[in-house]
Image (cartoon, rainbow, N blue to C red):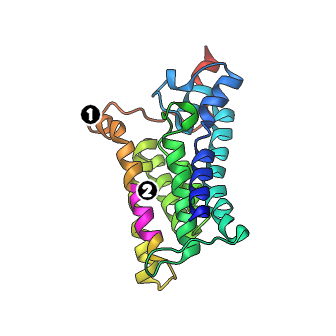
Amino acid sequence: MFSFIVIIVLSYLLGSIPTSIWVGKIFKRVDIRDHGSGNAGATNTFRILGWKAGTVVTLIDLAKGFTAAYYISQIGYHIGDVPVSIAMWETDVFMRLIAGAAAVGGHMYPLYARFKGGKGVITAAGMLYGIEPISITLAIIVFLTILFTSRYVSLGSIFSCFSYPLFLLMLRYGFDQPIDGSLIVISAVVAATIIIKHHTNIRRLLEGTENRIQSFKPAKGRLNRE
């Protein structure tokens, strides 16, 4: 139980690192939440600060989820206090999911930024790459397909989150892949949470006022053009 608590706390604190906020303040002395959509995530960073800052934020946010799921989740094995998972779920997969989900929660509600963070999509992708890469790769293909056809980042994010648990079910029951039940259940909860976090984007999509990507050329950033 002790290691279970330690894993959750450390993963949450790691996820709480407000990458886009710190990058904005360090390089441009601005709070990214005061510009664009007001979201403390990679998309708004690309839009406001340009591709270099956006790439840095993306890579760090990916690393937060991956590090939590792949490394922090293993603490119990090193200190000799391995938590027991639920029912027939595999302990290792379950703990990777718990650690990754805590990191995603930290990204969405960061302790270091008054609990106002990003949508959690990229951190969740990093988490899932640390657990099962095939399904998340398929979900990213969905994201890119919708992004390049619609030019809506939010729409691609929503559909990729929705499709991810479906890909897991397909792999498990259609291709007999050893997908643990915990991965299906917890990833579905995380996906639903991320979709709910996009509620303002969904409203703007329905109203036709959502921001579209105007060009796929490397973004210079609005502040860099001022």
Q: Where 76 sits versus 49, above or below?
A: below
Q: Check the image and name the residue furthest to the left.
A: 207
Residue at image position (61%, 45%) is 13
Q: Amino acid at mark 1?
A: Glu
Q: Quadrant of the N terminus?
A: bottom right
Question: Residue 7 location, x and y as percent?
Answer: 61, 58
The residue under the point 57% across, 69% down is 132
Let me know if residue 163 is in the magenta part. no
Point out the stretch of residues depicted in magenta. Answer: 183-191
* Front position in the image: 154 or 117: 117
Q: Earlier in the sequence, mark 2 or mark 1?
A: 2
Left or right placement of residue 5 versus residue 201 in this view? right
Q: Which mark is residue 207?
A: 1
State whether residue 90 is above or below residue 111.
below
x and y percentages locating residue 46 in the rendered image: 58, 33
User: Is residue 189 one of those drawn in magenta?
Assistant: yes
Q: What residue is pinned by disc 2?
A: 190
Nearest to the eye among marks 2 and 1: give it.
2
Which of the labelled discs sits on residue 180, or is there none? none
Q: Main secondary structure of the magenta part?
A: helix
Horizontal and vertical percent for residue 156? 43, 49
Mark 2 → mark 1, Cα distance in angstroms: 26 Å
From this view, report whether residue 32 is shown above or below residue 182.
above
Above or below, 117 relative to 96: above
Residue type marked 2: Val
